[in-house]
Amino acid sequence: MAGRIDARLAELTIELPKAAVPLAAYVPAVRTGNQLFISGQVPMWNGELRHVGKLGAGYSIEDGREAARVCALNIIAQAKLALDGDLDRIVRVVKLVGFVNSTGDFNDQPKVINGASELFGEIFGDAGKHARSAVSAASLPFGVAVEIEAILEVA
């Protein structure tokens, strides 16, 4: 039987990608106590890299927001895997750290990472409200536009 969060995803017609396999020497999630740390997720969809580009150099804020949304869906997919399929064990989205591949004069990183923040609100309601950092990066792995990591409180 699907849980409350799976039902919410279905209601919103949101599909989760397959949890990506690490592409370097790290693990995708670490749980300690009641916290689940999700490693930085890039906009990968079922093994296909998406949203390669640099904000401020021809890549739009809307494109960046969509990249951030895909990163957020990957965070949820990693959490689902780490929590044995039970997203209802997520008590709260505590913090996101968003990295935006952008030029030195681009200063709308918060607008880009809103693509992820708003998605967590849509799915988790008040429990999706979180602390956040949105910072510029001169470059990100594989040239992607966005990478986001998360800290979740879990039961």
Image (cartoon, grey):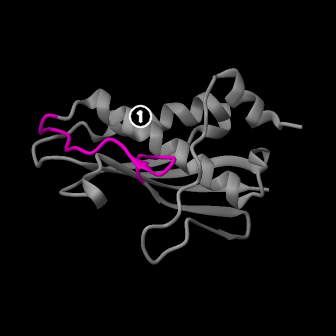
Residue at 73 percent across and 48 percent down: it is 91
Horizontally, residue 127 falls left or right of residue 2, namely left
Residue at 39 percent across and 33 percent down: it is 66
Quadrant occupied by the N terminus: top right
Q: Quadrant of residue 38?
A: bottom right
Determine crowd level at label 1: few under 14, some 14-19, many 20+ residues with C-alpha closer than 10 A. Answer: some
Residue 81: x and y in percent read: 69, 57
Asked if residue 151 lies in the magenta stretch, the reply is: no
Residue position for label 1: 114
- The magenta region covers 42-58
Placement of 5 over or under 153, stated as above or below: above
Horizontally, residue 27 falls left or right of residue 44, namely right
Residue at 74 percent across and 57 percent down: it is 83
Quadrant occupied by the C terminus: bottom right
Q: Main secondary structure of the magenta part?
A: loop
Residue at 61 percent across and 33 percent down: it is 15
Of residues 111 and 26, the one nearer the viewer is 26
| Amino acid found under the numbered disc labelled 1 | Asn
| Residue furthest out toward the bottom | 25
Residue 6: x and y in percent read: 75, 35
Placement of 22 over or under 133, stated as above or below: below
Residue 4: x and y in percent read: 80, 34
Asked if residue 49 lies in the magenta stretch, the reply is: yes
Of residues 2 and 55, the one nearer the viewer is 2
Placement of 102 over or under 108, stated as above or below: below
Residue 144: x and y in percent read: 29, 50
Placement of 27 over or under 96, stated as above or below: below
Which SS class for mark 1? Answer: helix
